[in-house]
Image (tube, rainbow, N blue to C red):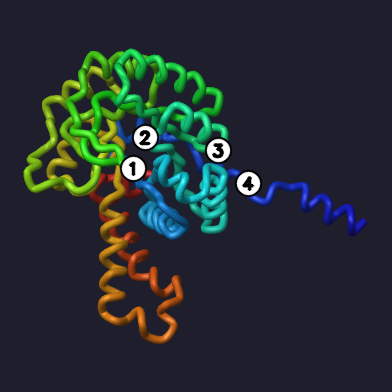
Amino acid sequence: MAIKSIKTIFEKPIISKPKNLVNAKEMVRKAFEGKYAVPHININNLEWTKTILLAAEEAKSPIILGTSEGAVKYMGGYKTIYGMVTGLMNDLNITVPVALHLDHGSFGAVEKALQNGYTSVMYDGSHETFEKNYANAQEVVRLAKKYNASVEVEVGSIGGEEDGIVGEGEIANPEEAKKMADLGIDFLAAGIGNIHGPYPSTWKELKFSALKELSSACGIGMVLHGGSGIPKAQIKKAISLGISKININTELQQANAQAIWKFVESGEAKKGKNFDPRKLYATGIEAMRKTVLEKINELGSKNKA
């Protein structure tokens, strides 16, 4: 009898998929209609993921956890990331809607992500001809439907650097954007003068007239990549014109690094057992928590879970 009970226990899955691990379609649609934006924050390890989830829960905000292909490789792979995210959601009793999203994925990466539990994917074919980008996006939409996953595609390349790929950026073509939207995608990334990474002093502003035209043509939530470092007034205006998902990465990296640098350079890291990673990383984690809460307030997603 006892042996049978033990067998029954071990036949059950150790990690179950949380009900609130969802695709991002509904959360972005609500943001588009309600004139706020859902934060998409890239994760790099367990500390990043745990901090973002707890901050989103504290603010009662929907959240999109993004991983680039480079981050997937760094963290060990899709299965590792899925297990980490679902395990943390269960153990931390996270109740807000969470989407696990592949950011700037190649066609092959999109397929692997979907097969390993990701609930949302971005296919980035912006470096291809529009015809090839469109054909691949069409196939991604078909594939994602099998997994009930949301889809983002990109038209008009985003400037700056992303995992070693440097782009000058361009303004998206409204006709091409509309054609992409008609495929049945859930949200669209379009170049409007935004860039990845820190914004140089020579950068002036987003191209709001282009955004207005793109949003009007597509009728779905638009995505602002390179959301770190854009002035708050421009963020608010962009949201009012249809931006419903904003990607954030650099600001968290900078906040984390600056806090840890300060802790080390002050000599605190050499005191007692402060070499313990739980103590060494503590100031960086707190800095990231504050940054996430600030971004949630800025984007207007607080209490929108």
* Marks 4 and 1, how far apart at CA: 32 Å
- Per the image, label 1 sits on a secondary structure element best described as loop
The answer to whether the residues at label 2 and label 1 have Cβ atoms under 8 Å apart is yes
Residues tagged 1 and 3 counted as in contact (Cβ below 8 A): no
Name which of mark 4 and mark 1 comes first in the sequence.
4
Task: Return the residue at label 3.
Answer: 117
**Category of crowding for the residue at label 3, using alpha-carbon neighbours closer than 10 angstroms: few (below 14), some (14–19), many (at least 20):** many
Which residue is identified by label 2? 104
Mark 4: secondary structure: loop
Query: What amino acid type is highlighted by mark number 3?
Result: Gly
| First reached walking from the N terminus: tag 2 or tag 1 | 2
Of the two numbered discs 1 and 3 on the same chain, state the one appearing first in sequence.
3
| Mark 2 residue type | His
Q: Is residue 279 above or below residue 163?
A: below
For badge 1, the amino acid type reads Asp
Callout 4, which amino acid?
Answer: Ser
User: Distance between the Cα atoms at labels 3 and 2?
Assistant: 17 Å
16 relative to 57 in the view: left or right: right
**Percent position of residue 303, x then y:** 35, 48
Disc 4 designates what residue? 16
